Structure formats: C-alpha cells, structure tokens
Image (spheres, helix red, strand yellow):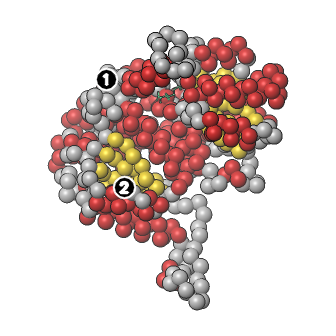
Amino acid sequence: MIFPFSTNGKKIFASLKRNFMTFPKINYENFKSLISEQEIDEFQPEMDRVCLMLEKGTGPGNEFLGWLRLPSSTEDDILCDLEKTAREIQNSAQVFICIGIGGSYLGSKAAIDFVLPNFYNQQANRPGPEIYFAGHNISSDYMADLLDLIADKDVCLNVISKSGTTTEPAIAFRLLKEAMEKRYGAEGARDRIYATTDRAKGALKKLADQEGYKTFVIPDDVGGRFSVLTPVGLLPIAVAGLDIRGLLDGAKNAESIYSGASSIRENPTCLYAVLRHLLYSKGKSIEIMASFQPALGSLMEWWKQLAGESEGKNQGGIFPASVQYTTDLHSLGQWVQEGNRIVFETFLIVESSNREVKVPKFEDDLDGLNYLAGKPLDFVNEKAYEGVALAHREGETPNMTLRIEDRSPYTLGRLFYFFERGVALTGYLMGINPFDQPGVEFYKKNMFALLNKPGYGKGNGS
Ligand code: PA5
C-alpha cells in the first residue's frame, strides 16, 4: 500500500520494489511449520493500519516520534560541531569516559563495539583514546577500579542524561568530576567535561550551565532508547573515530526505503513485526537474538533494551534475550535445543568479516583438524550457524535469520533504524504504547524511600 499522504508515492514505491527485501535479508524458512504464508498475508490490513498510525503520528506515544525523521533531519551544523568536539577530545584525552545508563549509553557502546576491532582499548596503534563506560551501575568496585585506571592518564568525560536526574550516572559523574577537579583544577576540568542533556530542564542542564560545560541537546521528541542517532550516541561514536555521517547515511537510506509503505512482502520492518507478533500469539514469548560474532554482543544489548522497554507492558510482550554463538552453544545451547518450547530465535549474521583467518595445516594432524586445513574461519562459522539453525528447527525452536553485509557504520545505521521501526510496529500491533516506560519508576521509588531521599517518605535505610 502507498499512503495517500506520501508526497512522492510513486517514486518511493518504485524504489521499494528494488531495495526493500535487500536489507536486511530475512529468511524465515524455519518458521514454516508454525506460520503459513496465508496467515502472514491476512495481517496486511492490520499492518496498513499501524503503519498509518506511525507515519501520521496518531498512535499512543506520538509525542516521541522524532526518531522517525532523525536521519533525514539532522542538521549539518550539529554534525560539524560533533566532529570538531570529537577531534578536541581525541587530541587531549588518553581515556574517554562516557557516563550514562539505558538509552544514554547502550547505543554508543553498540556502535563502538560493532565497528571497531575487538580489543580496541588494548591496541598500541589505536588512533583515539581508550573508551570506557560508567554510570550504568552502582558498583563500588567498578568505580574504584575505573578511578585507579585513569589515575595517571589524561581524561575527558561525556555525561549523558536526558532527564538529567538519573541516580546512577549522577553518582558516577559526581565521583569522576571530583577526580577531574583534583587533577586539573575546576577550570581545567571544565574544558574536559561535555554534557548531553535536555535543552532546558533537569539537574544536569542546570549544573552544566552553572559550570560552563559544552553541552549537546537531546531533542524533546526522542526517547532514550531511540536516541542513538542524536548527540547521545553520535558524540561518543565520533570520539571513537567512527564515521558518523556514514552511520546517518545508512539510517537515511533505511528511512527513505521503509517510510511511507506498509507492504509486509516488501518492507522488512513490517515482515519482522508480523512474524514476531504471530509467533507471540502462538505462545512463543521469548525472542533470543543470536550472533556468531562477539562484536555484535553490545548491539544485542541495545536491541534488548529497545524491545524490552518498548513492548513489556500490561503483563505481556515478548521477552528479548540474547546469546553469542558458538560460545553459548556450550552453555545455553542445551536449553534452546530441548528446554521449554516458548522461544523463537533470530540469527543476526554478518556476511563478510573485516579480516580473513584460515585454519593452518599441521603435518602430524595430532588434533585431527586437517580436514579443515586452508578453510577460512568464516566458512566454519557459517557451517556452525547452518547446523544450529537446522538443529533448533528440528528441536521446535522456530528461527529466522537477518543477514547484513558487514560491520560498517553505514550498515549499522540501516540496522538501528530497521530495529527501531520493527519494534515500534510490533508495539502498535500489540496495542500498547511502545514509547513510554512507566514500569522503570517502581524500583526507583522503593530505592529512594530506602535511601531516605527527601520527598520519598521514610524507608528503613541507615
Ligand atoms: O529509554 C529510556 O528512556 C530509558 O532507558 C533511559 O534511557 C534511561 O532510563 C536513562 O535515562 P536518562 O537519559 O534520563 O538518564
């Protein structure tokens, strides 16, 4: 369907036909015993309805739809400022610490781990600073170890909080600010601290203004878990030396090919949402995202927050989990193969590695591995994936595969947008507001009362 409000519908439709099923490539052959093609097609009218809600902004949570147009609307001035600031940080810091929790750190960590080499922080010829994250826990040991690590290194901080009032990053920032001020003095520390927060409100905004920190703005209409393509994600990603324009170009490509059309057969975001919804309605209440590359571990953490906070409402929703294969085949693999049949699996496969490594040949063949001699590890990994997908299908864990080309910023930009749209559509199919997170407040109220925070009643904290 082409939406009536699409300004250049015909043009978009032509490009859809060419591009749609190319990213990501979705194979759901291993769902076939559970879901028929007819069932998928019967969802088309419902999909038309929820796509219209999203595009026209008539659904619940419509005040948080800024992410939909972020790729095409981010101004060049902002990008230039981010790149300039990133260069400043690269030139003055041996260590860069990104302080934030939830949507305020998972996206940048996902991007940095996805694109950069494994063991980046340990690389001798690393082009930029070592990168660490803080403020996503309240662990005394984690913080003390981090403070030790930076004791004799030049440091820059980026403190990120949309509300500006979140406890975990506020505590981490207080400790790191104190360490910076001891080291550089108040003036010197000020030039090494960057704040990303709301345009006008919150304690962090007030503090940043008072201290004179350089500040980047999180748009009002973009929620935390949808904010990776705002300065929340873009500044740390640029500091890591990644091409933020390439990342946004990928997202822009996704925005242009996914927006304005709702055909399940042509739009992978619609197909992904319908498949998930159908599986959920058949009792598959856990989605396990599985990758065969350690570099995708943090991306799966980002996806878990995106899906979990968006869809876990009204005592329902798919529980998002993740595994890293083949590592977890030797731990959780048994459960996925033969445990409770309430799971489905989504394999996220990168088609080409950055570097090729082949199995060497040993004359004595004592380990019996010569049958693999000369074979690239990618070949072995692909066969492992094929074997797992088949075994799990036979074990009644239905699985689909999303294939992406590579670990480039461009591909990642497309993927971020794909998941954001896919999760938003699933939420609307489920009849919930995918853009709020009221449940997150409950633990805070108890914790604050137990800590005797003013205004939260008397707890029994000491
Ligand atoms: O998606 C969300 O809105 C949340 O996960 C937030 O990102 C998280 O709670 C951190 O909030 P803040 O950026 O306000 O510190």
Q: Nearer the viewer, residue 332 or 211?
A: 332
Closer-to-camera residue (397/441): 441
Spot occupied by residue 422 in the image (x, y as percentages of width and height): 36, 39
The three-letter amino acid code for the residue at tag 1 is Gly
Residue 159 located left or right of residue 378: right
Q: Earlier in the sequence, mark 1 or mark 2?
A: 1
Image quarter where the N terminus lies is top left
Which residue is situated farthest in the bottom direction here?
Answer: 364
Q: Is mark 2 within 8 Å of ligand 1?
A: no
- Which of the 4 image quarters holds residue 239? top right
Q: Tell me if residue 383 can be seen.
A: yes
Residue at point 33% right, 26% down? 433
From the viewer's perspective, is residue 358 above or below residue 260? below
Looking at the image, which residue is at 43% across and 41% down?
304
Q: Residue at 38% across / 36% down in the picture?
A: 308
Residue that mark 2 sits on? 401
The secondary element bearing badge 2 is classed as: strand
Residue 372 locus on image (x, y percent): 50, 79
Please rate how many residues cluster around mark 2, counting C-alpha atoms within 10 Å: few if below 14, some from 14 to 19, many from 20.
many
- Find disc 1 in the rendering and name its residue: 59
Q: CA distance from mark 1 to mark 2?
A: 30 Å
Circle 1 — which element?
A: loop
* Residue at left offset 65%, top offset 36%: 143
